[in-house]
């Protein structure tokens, strides 16, 4: 769903004064706690009018979606979200209490499970000046997976290195660097088989979509887009089976994506985490993560440069 789609639902608006929701407006990084562990989510609250709220949300998986209904009064926030890939429930529901720059509450999520969640204000991640970049370093060294781990199980044998090419047949675990990064320049050459769908996560939180979509209409869910949030400005993708070059610069929230020598995203702001993120701790360094639970992909000459 495009990043511009925002839910617009009024609470009991009559009698409210301007500024009624100032303390809850903005972006929030959520952590949802279940009996099986935690997962990240994201919420943005904005004004539709001076007495009505609107919002958008990113869940455990999928893309940004509109908030169906949202209300805030006397320090309590409640909102509902239409399902996307979730099952066993008609909508997700959240209720929480604002305590300074923190929200704590309960939610009903997939399969009707009742969970607790916390939310903290998302950091601005503003940079005071452009970085001076050091020399790039390889992320794949030798013939093995040194410096990488599987997200949810062993990386091998479904990820392997042969002849300098890192590859997966898909349908296995995501591959995560053991090193973490703040600002960086990432370079890769990649090849996708027909119909394949993969991605690279910046700091483990922001997915740049890698997909066989050459010749199709531009959309944030297609090749080179920041998944659900930012669409590429031009179709620079090559057909499946051909090697392609990808260069991504991330400074704070500002991302530039160059695909096959063409700038398709130029210094745009990433609003928040994308579905499938490792966590929602946006102020912390994070790894590079390669999506392995979808389609097949081959990568070579994978390097990263960080500020001096």
Image (cartoon, helix red, strand yellow):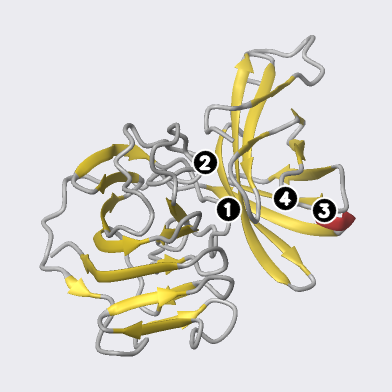
Question: What residue do we see at 43% from left, 33% from top?
Answer: 218
Q: Is residue 242 left or right of residue 137?
A: right
Identify residue for label 1: 275
Q: Is tag 2's residue or tag 1's residue first in the polypeptide sequence?
A: 2
Compute the Cα span from label 4 to label 3: 7 Å
SS label for mark 2? loop
Q: Which residue is mark 3?
A: 87
Of circles 3 and 1, the one toward us is 3
Residue at 82%, 53% (x, y): give it.
Answer: 87
Residue pointed to by mark 2: 228
- Residue 126 showing in the rendered view: no
The image position of residue 103, as x and y in percent, is: 67, 48
Q: Secondary structure at mark 3?
A: loop
Counting other residues with Cα less than 10 Å from the Cα at mark 2, is it few (<14), some (14-19), or many (20 or more)? many
Q: CA distance from mark 3 to mark 1?
A: 16 Å
Residue nearest the observer in this picture, 167 or 238: 238
Q: Is residue 227 left or right of residue 162?
A: right
How many other residues sit within 10 Å of disc 4, few (<14), some (14-19) or many (≥20)?
A: few
CB atoms at circles 4 and 3 under 8 Å apart? Answer: yes
Location of mark 4 (residue): 85
Whether pointer 4 and pointer 2 mark residues with C-beta atoms closer than 8 Å, the reply is no
Q: Do residues under tags 2 and 1 come within 8 Å of each other at their CB atoms? A: yes
The residue sitting at 26% across, 63% down in the picture is: 188
Q: Earlier in the sequence, mark 1 or mark 4?
A: 4
User: Residues under labels 1 and 4: Cα distance?
Assistant: 11 Å
Of residue 260 and residue 1, the one placed in the foreground of this image is 260
Residue 145 at x, y = what percent? Answer: 37, 86
Residue at x 77% of width, y 58% of height: 116
Query: Mark 1 or mark 4, which is nearer to you?
Result: 4
């Amino acid at each position: 769903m495009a990043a511009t789609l925002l839910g617009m639902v009024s609470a009991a608006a009559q009698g409210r004064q301007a500024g009624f929701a100032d303390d809850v407006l903005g972006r929030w990084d959520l952590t949802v706690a279940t009996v099986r562990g935690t997962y990240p989510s994201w919420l943005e609250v904005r004004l539709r009018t001076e007495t009505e709220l609107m919002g958008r949300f990113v869940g455990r998986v999928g893309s940004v979606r509109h908030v169906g209904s949202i209300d805030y009064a006397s320090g309590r926030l409640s909102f509902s979200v239409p399902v996307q890939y979730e099952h066993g429930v008609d909508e997700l529901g959240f209720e929480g209490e604002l305590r300074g720059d923190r929200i704590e509450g309960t939610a009903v999520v997939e399969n009707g499970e009742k969970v607790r969640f916390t939310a903290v204000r998302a950091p601005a991640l503003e940079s005071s000046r452009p970085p001076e970049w050091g020399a790039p370093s390889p992320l794949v060294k030798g013939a093995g997976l040194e410096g990488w781990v599987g997200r949810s199980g062993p990386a091998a044998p479904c990820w392997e290195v042969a002849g300098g090419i890192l590859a997966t047949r898909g349908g296995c675990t995501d591959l995560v660097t053991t090193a973490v990064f703040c600002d960086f320049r990432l370079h890769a050459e990649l090849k996708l088989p027909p119909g394949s769908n993969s991605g690279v996560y910046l700091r483990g939180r922001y997915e740049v979509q890698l997909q066989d979509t050459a010749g199709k209409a531009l959309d944030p869910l297609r090749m080179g887009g920041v998944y659900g949030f930012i669409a590429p400005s031009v179709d620079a993708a090559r057909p499946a089976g051909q090697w392609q070059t990808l260069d991504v610069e991330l400074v704070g929230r500002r991302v530039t994506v160059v695909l096959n020598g063409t700038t398709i995203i130029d210094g745009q702001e990433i609003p928040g985490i994308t579905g499938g993120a490792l966590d929602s701790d946006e102020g912390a360094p994070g790894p590079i993560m390669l999506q392995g639970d979808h389609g097949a992909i081959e990568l070579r000459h994978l390097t990263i440069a960080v500020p001096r």
